Image: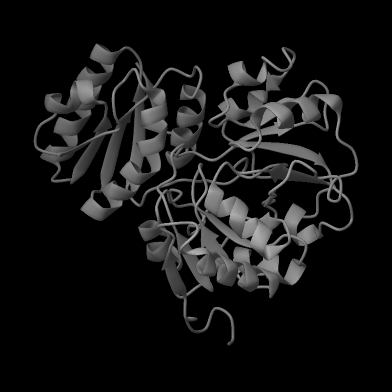
Amino acid sequence: MKEGKRLMKTKVAIIRNLNEDKDFINEAGNIIKLGGTVAFPTETVYGLGADALNGEAVKKIFLAKGRPQDNPLIIHVCSKSIEKFVKDIPKVAEKLIDKFWPGPMTIILNKKDIVPDETSAGLSTIGVRMPNSEIALKLIEAAGVPIAAPSANISGRPSPTDMERCVEDLDGKIDYILGGERSNIGVESTIVDCTVNPPMVLRPGGITLEMLRTVDENIVIDEALKEKPSEDLKPKAPGMKYRHYAPKAKLKIISGKNEKTVEIMCKMLENYIENNNKVAIITTDENIDRFKNCEVLSLGRKDNLNEIAKNLFETLRKCDDLGVEYILCQGFEEDGVGLAIMNRLNKAAGYDIIKV
């Protein structure tokens, strides 16, 4: 097949019972071994995987997603023993791994030569994660190699948290889609760079800064997360440089005290409707009845940021399903998981945020 010219046949299999459906996992693992590509569930979002130690296989991930070549990948492992892939593991990294693996945390370490440049985007470092998903761990075990995997979507789109969205984006572009449970975190892993001192959070996620600081109170957050990245940035971790998570519609974030936020959103909504634009509002359960003549979608209860994070990407996808032209989304406090939510919203909106 001449890549990019015609579609390939993608097999789709659903894991309903790990023991009864283990043949599907073994089949998918064998495809990874042979240099193929497999979408699979994790607790964060669905991943698109290939053999992390096979540069030619990894290239297929970039091709299927349309992902920029300078955007490094994370390698997924099924054991806390990662000495084969990284040169040194500082004490703080050991402590973080002991506490948060398996789980939604990626550690950046200096890589060994066994990890090809295609996987690390030419960097001397690599992100490593042990996912907290039985299907993912069994798949890595069946493959017998670490699996390099970004999110299983077209690059730039909202990440998929269920099998159906993987099929929507990647059917005909990859070898296999392994379906399972819906991702229960809903945003990608927290990335901690342990090659610097103090360790630095390069991407917020389900493991919050507050949680990380129970291991080392000196861990800091990259201040650059709050700004639009420069064009010449060489990203050390996924999600740092390019526009990500974006729906097709123009997304604007309105952030501030709840009453003022709702008031401004209603005024903006009126203006869009007067111009015959189709608009969606993304808000919380508490505000869902306060908007008229538009599509209104709730992320969940305002006081449950974990629920909001879990629903975020699927809600952005639903806006695309509805064919809206504009999306107005309320902002959230940047504490705990709120930091990860706002990081994803800012990226999705191209940092188009109105603070009220």
Residue 3: give x, y in percent of width and height: 58, 80
Looking at the image, which residue sits at the far left?
Answer: 293
Residue 30 occupies quadrant: bottom right
| Left or right position of 23 against 216 | left
| Left or right position of 324 against 157 | left
Please name whichever residue, 268 or 61, is drawn nearer the observer in this view of the structure. Answer: 61
Residue 120: give x, y in percent of width and height: 76, 53
Q: Is residue 99 above or below residue 22?
A: above
**Residue placed at 29% from the left, 52% from the top?**
320
Residue 270: give x, y in percent of width and height: 14, 31
Q: Is residue 208 above or below residue 324?
A: above
Q: Is residue 260 above or below residue 252?
A: above
Q: If the image is split into quadrants, where does the N terminus sit?
A: bottom right
Q: Is residue 18 above or below residue 58?
A: above
Please name whichever residue, 285 or 354, is drawn nearer the observer in this view of the structure. Answer: 285
**Residue placed at 52% from the left, 56% from the top?**
155
Q: If the image is split into quadrants, where does the C terminus sit?
A: top left
Q: How is the image coloured?
A: one colour
The answer, for residue 3, to whether it is visible in the render is yes
Looking at the image, which residue sits at the far front?
Answer: 19
The answer, for residue 68, to whether it is visible in the render is no
Residue 189: give x, y in percent of width and height: 58, 38
| Left or right position of 186 against 100 | left
Number of numbered discs:
0
| Left or right position of 179 against 285 | right
